Amino acid sequence: MARDKIYQEEEFPSPLIQLWIIFRQTPSIMIGLGAFIFLVILAIFSPILAPHSSVESNVAMAMLPPAWDDAGNISYLLGTDDLGRDMLSRLMHGTSLTFGLSFIVVIIATVIGVFIGSLSALTRGVKSSFLNHFLDVILSIPSLLLAIVIVAILGPGLSNTLWAVIMVLIPQFIHITRNAVKEEFAKDYVLASKLDGASSLRILHYSVMPNIIEKIVSQATFAQSAAILDIAALGFLGLGAPIPLPEWGAMLASGFDLFYIAPWTVYLPGLAILFAVVATNLVGEGLRHAIKLRKFS
Amino acid sequence: MFIFTLRKLNLFLFTMLLLTILSFSLSFLFPGEQLINISGQINATEQELAILATSYNQEGNIFEQYLAYVFHIFSGDLGVSMSSQTDIAGEIVRLLPATIELSMFAFVIATVIGVPIGFVAAINHNKVTDNVILAVAMIGYSVPVFWLGLLAILTFSIQLGWLPSGGQISLLYEIERPTGFMFIDILVSESPHKWQALQNAYAHIILPAFVIAAAPATVFIRLARSAMLSVLETSYIRATRAKGLSFIQIIFRHAIRNALIKVIQHIGLQFANLVTLAMITEVIFNWPGIGRWLIESIYQRDYTAIQSGLLVLSTFIFIVHIITDYTYAALNPLARGAKYGSR
């Protein structure tokens, strides 16, 4: 949409709108955003869109190669696995598991992390230093290792995996919110509202939050790509989603034995994970780029 | 430098304190009896349990119990594995070198490949080369490592048959393992087929190491690129240009040195990520390292092993962090003054 100046009026778009104006200028990033939205729609509507059931097996149609192969069948576009389940439908249902759940996981982790982080930014002294060291320790443990330990405590299963991934992601959000809030609190406009008599919480809500929300959103996209990979990795190791569920990592693991006979059962879930992660990373990359450009303009 | 060392030491002690507390509290969090979780003695009789209880100071309060646990760790007793009843400390000493070897190998590959490519991208900023490198890097750190591992096995081991698909060395070579590090063991061994064994070990490590290195290498590309870009914008580079130095002189004498310092600062942080990737890759490539052992102990609900494995792996990662911090401080005097956590 062209932004014509008809009236002699200065226009100051809000920070988020400014971000969007810069964000949409790069074509590759808009493609990423398109793919991201596509995945979100697929995750929500997959039960309606998928041509077959994700668990129903049809042994007569087992191990069909994808439709473009000579032995393929057009009603099973991407072939079938060893139990005759349609790969396309399983992948579509898997979107709502791997991608959709990672979305929910990140939202929960963001809310908790931002809450703790912004409160902890207001503390000073020993408490603050302790928290800093504590976060450093947690961040130095590999996320997957931590997730594995949490799964070991809670026992394997999809919902436990999700809790594990949430807990692994929270420290990153605390860390980034804390640093961002501290940075903002050192600025003059915060001092101005402090002089007006605003309480810390009020400053946090009305002055600081609108200015750091973009940092949090860009962190959230990176957290989501990590969450997709972690959920899939735990699924692949057999600690996450149970086998019949079409979670992409678990699908890959169950295709592992058929690798040499039916390679598409391994190629396709992997490609799906790659696609989702690239789309998420492109959006995150675009956000980060836009934030950087806006700072300079 | 002395104060810097003190500060690092302080941080190290604090971290070890937290890690041991974490691992100690895990024995309460895991399902089952705490004493059995911490010691791994599932088949112990009443008397043996009573002896264990005194050695772990179960009568005392929680703080005394923790002290007893730390004392056990320092005397090299991490308990026994619940599933195999073998000594965990011994297992870890046997398995950790393989993981260290693999992750170090991958780390070197990632650095050697990633950093120069990142510099090339920065020098060609906003040109086709830069964009291509960035696009490849984006795919590189998005690709799931288990999938990449499977594809690598399919291509290089099955279809092309160039490299073995798993294990650390062919079983034909009998190498004694005094240190646990395969390459050192081969070099000190008296075996007549030393050089063939060495070649064989190389052939085994290349594939998993490259698979692990893929994602960190792309992160290094981006780190090196942004470091180089910020160096190229500084006024001292403009000054060298005004002096009439050639482009190659500017890059090799001035820019690369200063950019490398910035890269080294962040390189250590990638190590934790790399170890995670190594754990999964060990499972796929059947590598006899601590990652595979840890994941297998989850399948077997071997809580003692998980607890000790967590402690040892995170200590290892933390030591690497401190080493890179030292390298950074040794190379860059400015960093020694910076207060920890002041960023």
Image (tube, coloured by chain):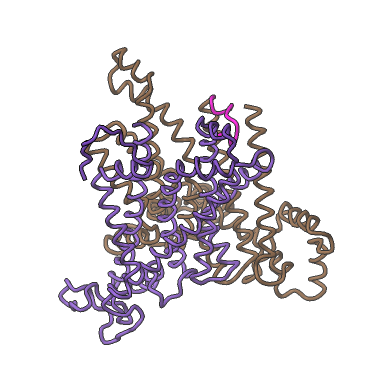
Chain colours: A purple, B brown
Residue A6 in the image: state x and y as whole percent. Answer: 21, 36
Residue B125 x, y percent position in the rendering: 28, 33
The stretch of residues the image draws in magenta is: B334-343
- Helix, strand or loop for the magenta stretch, by majority: loop
The vertical placement of B210 against B342, above or below, is below
Q: Nearer the viewer, residue B188 or A275?
A: A275
Can I make out residue B110 in this image? yes
Q: Residue at 32% of width from left, 61% of height from top?
A: B151
In the image, residue B342 above or below residue B238? below
- Residue at horizontal 41%, vertical 62%? B166
Q: Residue at x 26, y 77 (%)?
A: A51
Task: Please report the residue visible at 51 percent of the width from the left and 55 percent of the height from the top.
Answer: A111
The percent position of residue B247, horizontal first and vertical second, equals: 28, 22
Give residue A139's position: percent from left, percent from top. 55, 49
Residue B12 placement: quadrant = top right
Residue farthest to the left?
A70
- Is B335 in the magenta? yes
Q: Is residue B202 visible?
A: no
Specify the quadrant that holds the C terminus of chain A: top left
From what the image shows, is residue A226 above or below residue A1? below
Question: Left of B193 or right of it: where is A175?
Answer: right
The answer to which of B322 and A140 lies nearer the viewer is A140
Is A87 left, or right, of A159 in this rendering?
Answer: left
- Rendered-image quadrant of the N terminus of chain A: top left
Is residue B8 one of those drawn in magenta? Answer: no
